[in-house]
């Protein structure tokens, strides 16, 4: 029986990367999301429109999907404003139902072998208190309001009942090509830089106190999904994912300015979320001047401008507690891919410029 993967949430950061990784490895890929993933245009991938919140429609679509052996589940429902929604009961319940609406009917119509589920550092309680340093997958579950635990508990029971394997991946601050998504910083930084330049201002770092951070390139996460699907040692396991190093925004900022061909400025603390969305008229002037793809600011930043303020520690006088995760476990299991975080961030900025999303 030939393996065939269904990538759910294919218009998002991890979904797009995973679909590309599997397609390049020769797998038949079905990409599912509410909106068509334009970044998969040239990847020879089948697309199916799917709204995971519509239980009946989801079941109908799943009945038409045949031969699916593997699932990469990357879909997420986020409320406007992003951060406040992470503990919202409605958002938590909605995300839990979305996974159930998919896997329930899909397992009845296909012979599933493996499901990959995405989590993140919220699993370690980063939003409710200091994390252990480093956070390890073996640590006791931190009970706090989030949808991870509802999804994970359902997946474990469902996998046992239907006799398939699963792997949970916990990537740290993913960086990639997608714009208009909930948590991807390159499009936000690119827009911010363009607006500053149009106002005759240098690219000032807008954040608060400096701190060490971790990130992971979307290509690494996509390849980790492929690795987990094809390796028995990953069955039933949870793995943290990072590029393999730490970085500082201030240290990276000169390289970002160079990648965008804009002058570097002194620090200027400000809310990127507020600054960006107050300048729609100026952005449309920039779009016309540089012959960019005609997107609104909202179509480019999605909810990621709120994520930028969080990652840049805007308004913080003291360094937030460190958010470091150990990746020893997945390296010891045999997945050893790494990326230079500065090169990764600048690579995706240049990609956005090449695709005329930013100037």
Image (cartoon, rainbow, N blue to C red):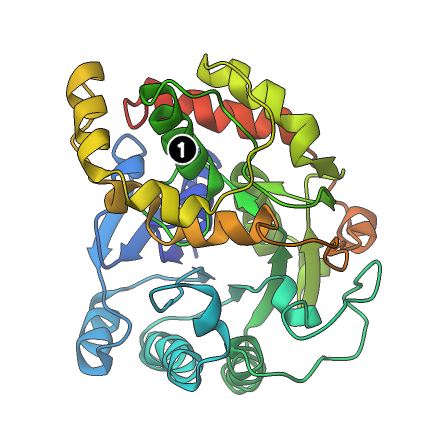
| Label 1 CA crowd tier, 10 Å (few <14, some 14–19, many 20+) | many
Residue 134: image location, x then y, percent? 83, 58
In the depicted structure, whether residue 78 falls above or below residue 179: below
State the residue at coordinates (68%, 39%): 243
Q: Quadrant of residue 165?
A: bottom right
Q: How many circles with numbers are drawn on the protein?
A: 1
Residue 349: image location, x then y, percent? 45, 26
Indicate left or right for 117 with 12 as reference. Answer: right
Q: Quadrant of residue 235?
A: bottom right
Q: Quadrant of the N terminus?
A: bottom left
Badge 1 element: helix
In the depicted structure, whether residue 64 falls above or below residue 196: below
- Circle 1 is placed at which residue position? 192
The residue lying toward the viewer, choosing from 151 and 270, is: 270
State the residue at coordinates (42%, 63%): 82
The residue lying toward the viewer, choosing from 197 and 287, is: 197
């Amino acid at each position: 029986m030939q393996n065939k993967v269904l990538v759910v949430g294919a218009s998002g950061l991890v979904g797009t990367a995973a679909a590309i990784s599997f397609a390049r490895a020769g797998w038949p890929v079905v990409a599912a999301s509410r909106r068509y993933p334009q970044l998969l245009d040239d990847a020879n991938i089948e697309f199916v429109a799917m709204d995971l919140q519509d239980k009946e429609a989801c079941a109908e679509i799943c009945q038409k999907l045949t031969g699916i052996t593997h699932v990469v589940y990357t879909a997420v429902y986020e409320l406007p404003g992003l951060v406040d929604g992470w503990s919202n009961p409605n958002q938590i319940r909605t995300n839990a139902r979305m996974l159930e609406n998919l896997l329930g009917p899909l397992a009845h119509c296909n012979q599933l072998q493996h499901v990959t589920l995405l989590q993140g550092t919220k699993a370690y309680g980063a939003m409710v208190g200091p994390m252990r340093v480093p956070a390890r997958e073996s640590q006791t579950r931190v009970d706090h309001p989030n949808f991870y635990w509802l999804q994970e508990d359902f997946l474990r029971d469902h996998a046992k009942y239907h006799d398939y394997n699963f792997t949970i991946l916990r990537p740290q601050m993913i960086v990639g090509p997608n714009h208009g998504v909930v948590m991807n910083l390159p499009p936000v930084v690119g827009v911010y830089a363009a607006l500053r330049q149009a106002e005759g201002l240098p690219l000032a770092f807008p954040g608060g106190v400096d701190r060490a951070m971790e990130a992971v390139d979307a290509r690494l996460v996509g390849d980790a999904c492929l690795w987990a699907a094809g390796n028995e040692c990953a069955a039933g396991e949870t793995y943290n994912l990072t590029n393999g190093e730490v970085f500082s925004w201030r240290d990276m900022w000169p390289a970002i300015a160079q990648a965008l061909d804009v002058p570097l400025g002194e620090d200027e603390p400000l809310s990127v979320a507020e600054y960006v969305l107050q300048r729609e008229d100026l952005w449309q002037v920039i779009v016309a001047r540089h012959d960019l793809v005609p997107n609104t600011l909202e179509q480019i930043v999605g909810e990621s401008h709120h994520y930028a303020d969080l990652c840049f520690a805007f308004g913080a006088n003291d360094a937030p507690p460190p958010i470091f995760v150990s990746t020893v476990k997945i390296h010891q299991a045999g997945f050893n891919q790494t990326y230079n975080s500065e090169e990764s961030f600048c690579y995706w900025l240049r990609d956005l410029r090449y695709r005329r999303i930013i100037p």
